[in-house]
Image: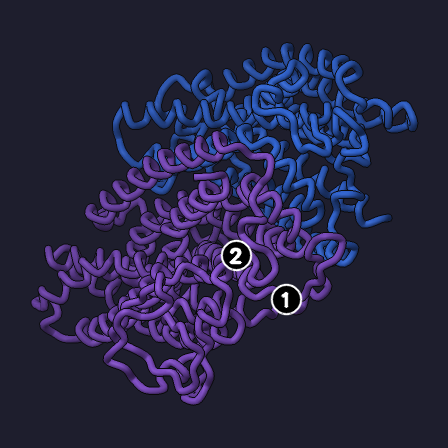
Amino acid sequence: MDVLALSRLQFAVTTMFHFIFVPLTLGLSVLTAWFETKYVRTGDATYLRMTKFWGKLFLINFALGVVTGITQEFQFGMNWAEYSRYVGDIFGAPLAIEATAAFFLESVFIGVWIFGWDKISKTAHAVTIWLVAFGTNLSALWILLANGWMQKPVGFVLRNGRAEMNDFLALITNPYGWIKFLHTVTSGYMVAAFFVMGIAAWHLLRKNEIDFFTRSFKTAAMFALLSGLAVGATGDFHAVEIAKVQPTKFAAMESVWETQKNAPMHLLLVPDEANERNAVATASIPGMLSFMAFHDVNGEVKGLKEFPKEERPPVLPVFLSFRLMVALGTLMIGLSLVAVIAVRWKHFLNFKLFLWIMVAALPLPYITVQLGWLVAELGRQPWVVYGVLKTADGVSQSVSLLQVGGSLVGFTLLYGLLGAIDIYLLVKYAKKGPDNDTTGMIPVKEVA
Amino acid sequence: MELQITWFVLWAVLWAVYFMLDGFVLGTGFLSGILAKNDTEKRLLINSVGPVWDGNEVWLITAGGATFAAFPTTYALMFSYMYTALLLLLFSLIVRGVAFEFRGKIEGEQWKGAWDRAIMISSFLPALLFGVAFGNIFKGLPMDAGGHHGGLLSLLNPYGILTGLLFVCLFAVHGALYASLKTVGDLSKRAFELAKMLWIPLLLVALLFLGATAYSTKLYDNYLAAPYLFLIPAIAVLALVAVQAYMIANKPLKAFSASCVTILFVVFTGVTGLFPNLIPSSLDPAYSLTIYNSSSSQYTLTIMTVVAFIFVPIVIAYKIWVYRIFRAPVTEQDLLENKEAY
């Protein structure tokens, strides 16, 4: 392994670890804010207990999302100095805006939310968690506009030996970034919805706090279905955008070797990368792939052979990740639909098989979002900025093998330890259930 | 004013504000083991910084982001040249944040003891490392056409370590004063006495730093060329003296305010001496990173200036609101009433 390979591995480890916590933050902040709003509007103490219970799990998760985010900002400079120097003029802007416009919002108001229960009015307190939710979602927008630029670079010229911004509006209206943002945040909502449903189902199987967990489940099921449909819809538009601007990624996602019109989709497909063909390609739907790519059955899908070998992404991992992501996504939309209906059924609590399935389904969206990122980032290779800069040309020149090796081991150990503790605490507090004693919780002061 | 100069000033302000705000969190953190006699007192200290530490840390993210957006070449080289030091810094900041959140989640002496040690170490290291990093920036890094000729050990030169100690002492007094303001009774008194005591080594290190700066760096060149600039270090020194004067007069809030001014002006003193460099080369001035040869394009700087002038005032406004909400000291009663407290 050389500095490049280790730096890539480290980026993958730190980013994927960071993204274990971020999606739940995106969705659970919204759900917690929803519960607290219900409490403020109805005065129903169960909603307050829901806010506190799901809010506590939110906070345990939030902590790791925040601290691993610092690494994200530092490691561009530490490990990808050539990249940072080359694209900083345009790439640095959304990162700096993310910090000033979004990070401050979530980080300042999370403090008020945790410690401000008896210091501000009920309504103001509910507003603070909405500000946290808004801040985290806004920060997702800015980082995905930055990532969208790496996928589809816009609004820049190559000048003075680097990419210089010449159109800020193009950067912030980049359709690629916006679709990616919508697709990512809605899949974050899926993570949170399945998290809530999974834990609620676990307690319902034990007949704990039936009212509390049925209501939680009901809200989360609707949230899951709506966001699941949004994930699907944005995913469809995303695929069209990819076919248009990143033909190599699209070809790898579907393992297409030959350019063809009216391209079929093969349900059963085994890529054979070495021989630039598919070993097996059957159960085909005629014209389906062209339709997926261009919303037109006669559209021409570019095959990988159109591109030199050194400009193709690794086909098998991109292909497998994409297939699995779509399969799991579809499965979860189906589960959400059943959940929305089943929770309204009077024998819901006796539907034990389904409750067990929902407990087991808790990790599914976590796996799916990681697969999505593998498609996005591996599919972009060998480019770090698609068509502009190769990943190999972006790595730091002054960093030694020992340094990267050491930091990779350090990150792996530290993150592994903290991740294990975090999961332990989440499980502990999730199993414990909501606090029974509502005294000491009610005295949220009304401050005029 | 040239946009590069605007951003140089903003860059200095962002770092200075970060050190002023996280300085007391770090100081309270590494002094917690000395100050607190039992679990309740430790919790009082942690909860005194609880509502604000996360928001304060964002000033660091913003300072880093601003460096990236306004001076990308400096961002790239500063972060990759100081790789190992920054890595230790990152690990510390990661552990510190998690420690605040996790410590109270399980009752148990071993669990809490482990996080207490984690808080102390992960608060002390950033204070030291930020000082070492800035000391080396003031001094210049050994860089030329061949890149950077140094590593973690070359950063640990006497001047770097001295600046590290200066930061540790500044944050210690700052943190002790904060702890004294934000607690009541015996703990508050002890913190106040500790601040008084720590002021003496701070003064010694500060004087040593001012002297060594003449010997180890070229920071004073700018001052000699424009002597009115000496006002900046003069304010830093006066504020430092005022810290102790207010402490003797038993006015902790004023002493803390003076400590804020001290930290801001220590940073301004160093950065003013750097101008127009961001990181000087200690080998050959031709390879120094200046605000001109490492900046973004005029277009990007213009956009970023507009962004900064819109959002920074908004951030400052709501941060002031938050500090007002949490202005009262943390009491044992608060810990009992708020189940969400750390």
- Left or right: residue A345 compared with residue B290: left
Chain letter of disc 2 in the image: A
Which chain, by letter, is purple? A
> What residue does disc 2 label?
A139
| Mark 1–mark 2 CB contact (< 8 Å) | no
Query: Of residues A435 and B101, which is closer to you in this image?
Result: B101
Chain letter of disc 1 in the image: A
Name the kind of residue labelled 1 in the image: Val
Residue shown at the point (76%, 56%) measured from the top left: B302
Please state the horizontal and vertical placement of residue B103, each as a whole percent of the image: 35, 32
- Left or right: residue A321 compared with residue B268: left
* Element under disc 1: loop
> What residue does disc 1 label?
A154
The CA span between labels 1 and 2 is: 20 Å
Please state the horizontal and vertical placement of residue A66, each as a whole percent of the image: 46, 45
On screen, residue A34 above or below A284: above
From the image, state the color of chain B. blue
Name the kind of residue labelled 2 in the image: Ser
Q: Residues within 10 Å of mark 2 (few under 14, many from 20)?
A: many
